[in-house]
Image (cartoon, rainbow, N blue to C red):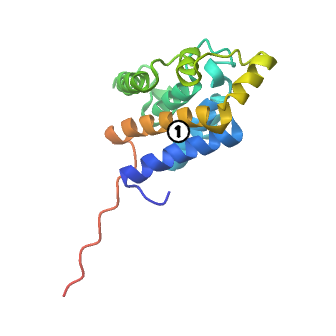
Amino acid sequence: MKSSRPEDLLARAYELGFEYEARYRGCSQCVVAALQDTLGARDDAVFRAATGLAGGGALTGAGGCGAFVGAVLVLGQLQGRERQSFADPDGIRFRTFELAARLQDRFIAEFGSTICREVQSGVFGRSFDLRNPDDFALFEAAGAHEDKCPDVVGRAARLALEIIIEAGLAPQPAAADPPAPA
């Protein structure tokens, strides 16, 4: 991570999200990777756990947008309840719920919904059955991985990172060195 200035981090999260989705596919994992790489907080178990969440969960379009769900996973990675504190006497899960709710509100403001099919309809003008080869071909022909889904992933990563920064969960900018004595 080169810079920890908020505007640089936000730009990096968007760029990585866009690049990863365009190159590798899998919106949920691409958001996870973009956020983890931007923050220097790699966790391969969280990345792996996001595998089946793409395309509304198992490519069904019926569930949450993978970009949204992947971002929520990273919020939990950074501010989630630990297994050894399952009883959660400090109410950590409620702080995580609040962060996820903020993300949901912003995601809906940006895309109209957190449901994959509805996000697709807003971005493409229609939704696709990604498990149907013919519909998947139409999805790709409509620019799915040229710019449409990469933009959604990049914007989701940026939205999540805004919340991460506001919650104090991101690296803080290094203090400037004091001026040298004259």
| Viewer-proximal residue among 99 and 59 | 59
Horizontally, is 134 left or right of 93 in the view?
right
Number of marks drawn:
1
Neighbourhood count class around disc 1 (C-alpha, 10 Å): few under 14, some 14–19, many 20 upward:
many
Any part of residue 42 in sight: no
Q: Quadrant of residue 64?
A: top right
Any part of residue 111 in sight: yes
Q: Is residue 129 above or below residue 174?
A: above
| Viewer-proximal residue among 59 and 143 | 143
Which residue position is annotated with label 1? 154
| Viewer-proximal residue among 79 and 2 | 2
Residue, far top? 62
Residue, far bottom? 182
Q: Residue at x 42, y 53 (%)?
A: 8
Q: Position of residue 52 (x, y in %)?
A: 68, 23
Horizontally, is 33 left or right of 78 in the view?
right
Q: Residue at x 49, y 19 (%)?
A: 114
Residue, far left? 182
Q: Residue at x 73, y 23 (%)?
A: 138
- Residue type at the position of mark 1: Gly
Q: Position of residue 142 (x, y in %)?
A: 67, 28
Residue, far right? 133
Q: Is residue 90 above or below residue 18?
A: above
Mark 1 lies on a secondary structure that is helix
Q: Position of residue 178 (x, y in %)?
A: 24, 73
Q: Residue at x 38, y 50 (%)?
A: 7
Q: Position of residue 83 (x, y in %)?
A: 51, 26
